Structures are given as C-alpha cells and as structure tokens.
Image (cartoon, rainbow, N blue to C red):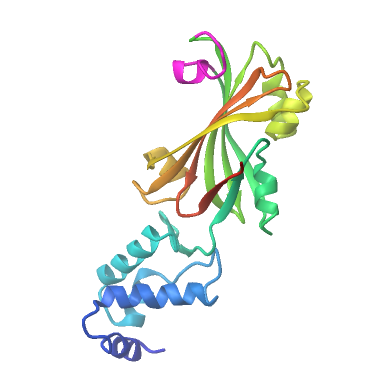
Amino acid sequence: MTSDAAGAELRKAPGVSRWQQIRDMLAADIAQGRLANGDRLPSEQALAVRFAVHRHTVRQALKALAAAGQVRTEHGRGSFACTEPLRYALGGRTSFTANVTDQGRAAGRCLELLETIRAPAAVATPLDLSRGALVLRALTIATADDVPVAQGAHHFPLSRLAGIEAAIRTTGGISAALAACGVGSFRRARTRISTRPATVEEAVALSMAPQQPVLITEGLDVDPEGVPIQFGITAFCGSRVELDVAT
C-alpha cells in the first residue's frame, strides 16, 4: 500500500481521528497474524510515510496500543507486537518454566544480582526471622520467547540454607538450588497479589513504558515441616501476563 493510498483510506472514516484509525489497522495486523508475537513494527517514520501523517500521530496510536498490551516499546529498539498474554498459574507449587513451556513458549531466566543483605521487616516477618537477620537476595528476570515478563526478588534465610548462594550460582535455578541444600520438596504457603505503576527499575528491566501497570505477587514458600525457606516479590508486566489462581 502506498502512502497516498493509506492516507486516502484513513480519510474514509469520518468522525474517527487518524491516530485511532492507525491504531485499529495495526491492531488488525497483529490479531490476524500479519504481525506475529515479538515482530518489530516499522519505525515511526516508516509508519508516518505509510499513513501520510505526522510522526506524533503515529506515536499516539502506538501509545494506545501499548496501553492495551498489544505492543511493547523498548527504548532505542522500537515497538514489538504482543499477542496472547501468558497465563501464569499460581498454586501450591508454582513453576515458571512449567507455566511457560505448557503454553508452547520458550522459558528463560537470567540472574541479575546475588547479594547478602540484612532483612527489612517486610522480608523478616514472613520468613519468621528477626529484623536485620542475614538473607540472600537473588534478583532475576524471567522471559517467555525472549520477551521479559517478570522481575523477581527472592529472599532466602541464610541461617536455614547453608550454601544456597553457591547452589544458585552452580545450578542456575531456584528449585535445583533448594534441592542441593536439602529442600527437595516445598510448597507455596500463601500468595498476596496487588497492582501498581512500574518503578523506573522495573520499567527498564521489563522493557515497559514508565508508569505502566505491574502485577505484584508476594509469595512465601515453606518446607514439608512448614518452615519458611523463601519469600519472593515478583513484578509481572501487566499487559503480558494473566495470573490464574488455583483453588
């Protein structure tokens, strides 16, 4: 389609602004598979030429698509199509890898940071520790089909899990590391879910626009005797993930 033809097509819908028509046409491209999940959209300049409009009109359409979760914008890289959100099941034994692979997607997890800290009250209380007790904090980024969907902060009581830091570095996984420390079985004792705008750090880590919503889960895992062994706070990109709570 030439830019003149596109511009003429936009003018065929009286009462609807140009940016809304561009939004709807790009949304149709995504819904009908002409743009698959993860495909890069043409640049703002290319879209402006295609639709014979100014770049700020295109930018308004892309902003609306991002707010609806149909595209994601990465600073310096452009905009990418998003299709069906990941359905993330929360239950007695939550596994990110199983959640993702069961939906035919490729799961990935990157360890961003591993540090020993003194537990603030918000971490010490669920872990049944004294405030200021030493805990290991592991910060991770989880991906589905190479798209970042969640940033997790995992906290482990060092007094109960000797060698957990080395185990995480060696195994690269939380469940495998716990098993290496003698906790072969554990379960989710409780999960609290909330929502808020993304912080600057979360927006950068998850390639989101600032202030877009994130779903927050605070989960406590316990061993077979009911002793707390992990407290995690995870920020999920609200436009890419649906939380499914099992009863």
Asked if residue 120 lies in the magenta stretch, the reply is yes
Q: Nearer the viewer, residue 69 or 186?
A: 186
Q: Quadrant of residue 246?
A: top right
**Which residue does the image show at 55% across and 11% down from the upper left?**
129
Q: What stretch is highlighted in magenta?
A: 117-130
Q: In which quarter of the image is the N terminus?
A: bottom left
| Horizontal relation, residue 165 to residue 34: left or right | right
In this orientation, does residue 118 appear? no
Q: Which residue lies furthest to the front in this view?
A: 247
Q: How many labels does the image show?
A: 0
In the depicted structure, whether residue 129 falls above or below residue 181: above
**Which residue does the image show at 65% across and 39% down from the upper left?**
94
Q: Quadrant of residue 185?
A: top right
In the depicted structure, whether residue 134 falls above or below residue 209: above
Q: Nearer the viewer, residue 24 or 125?
A: 125
Residue 186 image point, x, y percent: 71, 28
Asked if residue 108 lies in the magenta stretch, the reply is no
Q: In which quarter of the image is the C terminus?
A: top right
**Which residue does the image show at 62% across and 56% down from the upper left?**
145
Residue 24 image point, x, y percent: 37, 75
Q: Which residue lies furthest to the left in this view?
A: 15
Residue 4 image point, x, y percent: 31, 90
Q: Which of 68 and 89 is in front in this view?
A: 89
In this orientation, does residue 135 appear? yes
| Horizontal relation, residue 238 to residue 174: left or right | left
In the depicted structure, whether residue 101 falls above or below residue 58: above
Residue 173 image point, x, y percent: 70, 35
